[in-house]
């Protein structure tokens, strides 16, 4: 019996302090997650004029890859200058000028939290955060006695949240 109380007490203590620690991380993830929802729009993005030197006589696909811009379409060509949506390319010099819409520096860094791969040290934060949230979700079931009315009602909400998420994933 005392083992059950100590596990419950331990879960509550770790849950409490981990919750305080994760509050800052969750704030950044929440903000960056909302910004990511609008990544294909111009929401919060600022226009930036960029000039790059590429290989002379590059193909339009190579230009798109070099400037990280999809669906480049040539609108007109005048001599060595080729105009495309949002910029121009000089075939002789290899100079490309284009306009890019980017998030402000801090928001861009926040968004990279969600995009971190194993090639970046930031992915350790993502792994820690994911495992911590899993512990957070599981340890919350030790907050109330299993026979209590609140716990039973909480289980219905848990099942509803799980089912809603699964339904939305497959719509």
Image: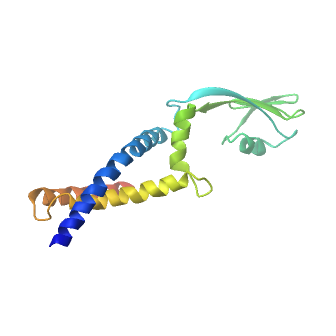
Q: Which residue is drawn at 69% across and 32% down?
A: 85
Judged left or right of residue 14, residue 67 is: right
Q: Residue at x 13, y 56 (%)?
A: 150
Instruction: Give the answer, above or below, for where 73 lies relative to 9.
Output: above
Q: What percent of the width, then of the height, locates residue 129?
A: 43, 54
Judged left or right of residue 160, residue 119 is: right
Q: What percent of the width, then of the height, locates residue 101?
A: 60, 31
Q: Which image quarter: residue 118?
A: bottom right
The color scheme shown is rainbow
Residue 75 seen: yes
Q: Observer-nearest residue: 54 or 64?
A: 54
Q: Residue at x 42, y 57 (%)?
A: 130
Judged left or right of residue 22, residue 110 is: right
Q: Residue at x 24, y 57 (%)?
A: 12
Image quadrant containing the N terminus: bottom left
Q: What percent of the width, then of the height, locates residue 137?
A: 30, 58
Q: Observer-nearest residue: 163 or 123?
A: 123
Instruction: Give the answer, above or below, for where 79 lies relative to 3.
Output: above
């Amino acid at each position: 019996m005392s083992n059950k109380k100590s596990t419950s007490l331990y879960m509550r203590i770790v849950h409490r302090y981990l919750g305080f620690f994760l509050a800052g991380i969750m704030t950044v993830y929440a903000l960056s997650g909302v910004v990511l929802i609008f990544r294909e729009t111009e929401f919060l993005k600022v226009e930036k004029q960029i000039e790059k030197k590429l290989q002379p006589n590059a193909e339009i696909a190579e230009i798109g890859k070099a400037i990280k811009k999809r669906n480049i379409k040539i609108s007109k060509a005048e001599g060595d200058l080729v105009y495309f949506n949002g910029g121009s390319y000089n075939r002789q010099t290899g100079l490309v000028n284009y306009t890019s819409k980017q998030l402000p520096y801090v928001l861009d860094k926040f968004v990279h939290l969600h995009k971190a791969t194993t090639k970046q040290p930031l992915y350790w934060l993502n792994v820690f955060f994911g495992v911590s949230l899993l512990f957070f979700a599981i340890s919350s079931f030790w907050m109330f006695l299993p026979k209590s009315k609140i716990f039973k009602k909480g289980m219905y909400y848990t099942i509803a949240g799980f089912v809603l998420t699964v339904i939305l994933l497959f719509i």
